[in-house]
Amino acid sequence: QHHNIIAPSILSADFAKLGEEITNVIDAGADWIHFDVMDNHYVPNLTIGPMVCKAIKPYCKDTPIDVHLMVSPVDSMIEEFAKAGADIITFHPEASLHVDRSLSLIKSFGLKAGLVLNPATPLSYLDYVIDKLDLVLLMSVNPGFGGQAFIPSILDKIKDTRIYLNKTGRDIILEVDGGVKIDNIAEIGTAGANAFVAGSAIFNSPDYAKVITEMKNQLRK
Ligand code: DX5
Ligand code: ZN
């Protein structure tokens, strides 16, 4: 069983000093660096791409870079991010015409692969590709922006997904992204998540270590 993973989303970091922000958040206890890629096509916002991933890689040292692709099409970006130092790549199945092929492409680079399900996307998207998944990322907000509120109905979806994943008998990580805070992380963990993306909760705070430590304490309860 995996220990709980805290994955700060650098979407809410200060992009003018990204290297320093990454060093600080890793020193503060980050387990993964969550890297949100938005293309102003699949989602209505534009963020950072493979060049920025390559630039931050030396600052991440041994901490995995968790690339969340909110782009369409996805395959060319999988290849670029593999070259740029990504360790984990997830994408939204409805953004790829050939989901199985895209997953195989991620695995062909030796990376961990996952699918991202939007709040209204059903679990059945996992059915025929589950053998290729190392993780499932459930969106608890609609993708595109940091700082949105956690959608409460996703707690039931996390429970359903945990049951679904346990039936495989494999150790597939269940990651949750959007509106994760100190005051709701315990119930998200109890519902069955074991990886937690948090952007604004960490980077809008003056003390990253305090937030991450408190999140981990909440998960021990
Ligand atoms: C939203 C992104 C999230 C976002 C999370 O599309 O995928 O990773 O940065 O930010 P918070 O934690 O502020 O909701
Ligand atoms: Zn994300």
Image (spheres, rainbow, N blue to C red):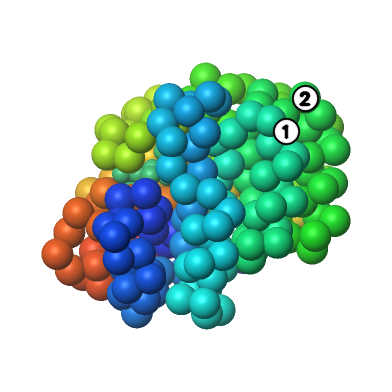
Q: Position of residue 44 (x, y in %)?
A: 43, 25
Q: Amino acid at mark 1?
A: Leu
- Within the image, what quadrant is residue 111 found in? bottom right
Q: Position of residue 217 (x, y in %)?
A: 30, 67
Q: Position of residue 220 (x, y in %)?
A: 36, 65
- Within the image, what quadrant is residue 19 found in? bottom left
Q: Residue at x 52, y 33 (%)?
A: 39
With 152 as the anchor, is 84 left or right in this view?
Answer: right
Q: Nearer the viewer, residue 175 or 159?
A: 175
Q: Amino acid at mark 2?
A: Leu
Q: Circle 2 sits in a helix, a strand or a loop, which is it?
A: loop
Query: Which tag, 1 or 2, sits closer to the chain's start?
Result: 2
Confirm if mark 1 falls within 8 A of ligand 2: no
- Residue 179 visible? The answer is no
Q: Nearer the viewer, residue 191 or 74?
A: 74
Which label sits in the foreground, 1 or 2?
A: 2
Q: Residue at x 64, y 29 (%)?
A: 72
**Pointer 1 and pointer 2: residues touching (CB < 8 Å)?**
no
Q: Residue at x 32, y 57 (%)?
A: 15
Q: Nearer the viewer, residue 64 or 19?
A: 19
Q: Position of residue 117 (x, y in %)?
A: 58, 31
Cα distance between the residues tagged 1 and 2 = 15 Å
What's the mark number on residue 97?
2
- Residue 95 visible? The answer is yes
Q: Quadrant of the C terminus?
A: bottom left
The residue pinned by badge 1 equals 126
Q: Quadrant of the N terminus?
A: bottom right
Confirm if mark 2 falls within 8 A of ligand 1: no
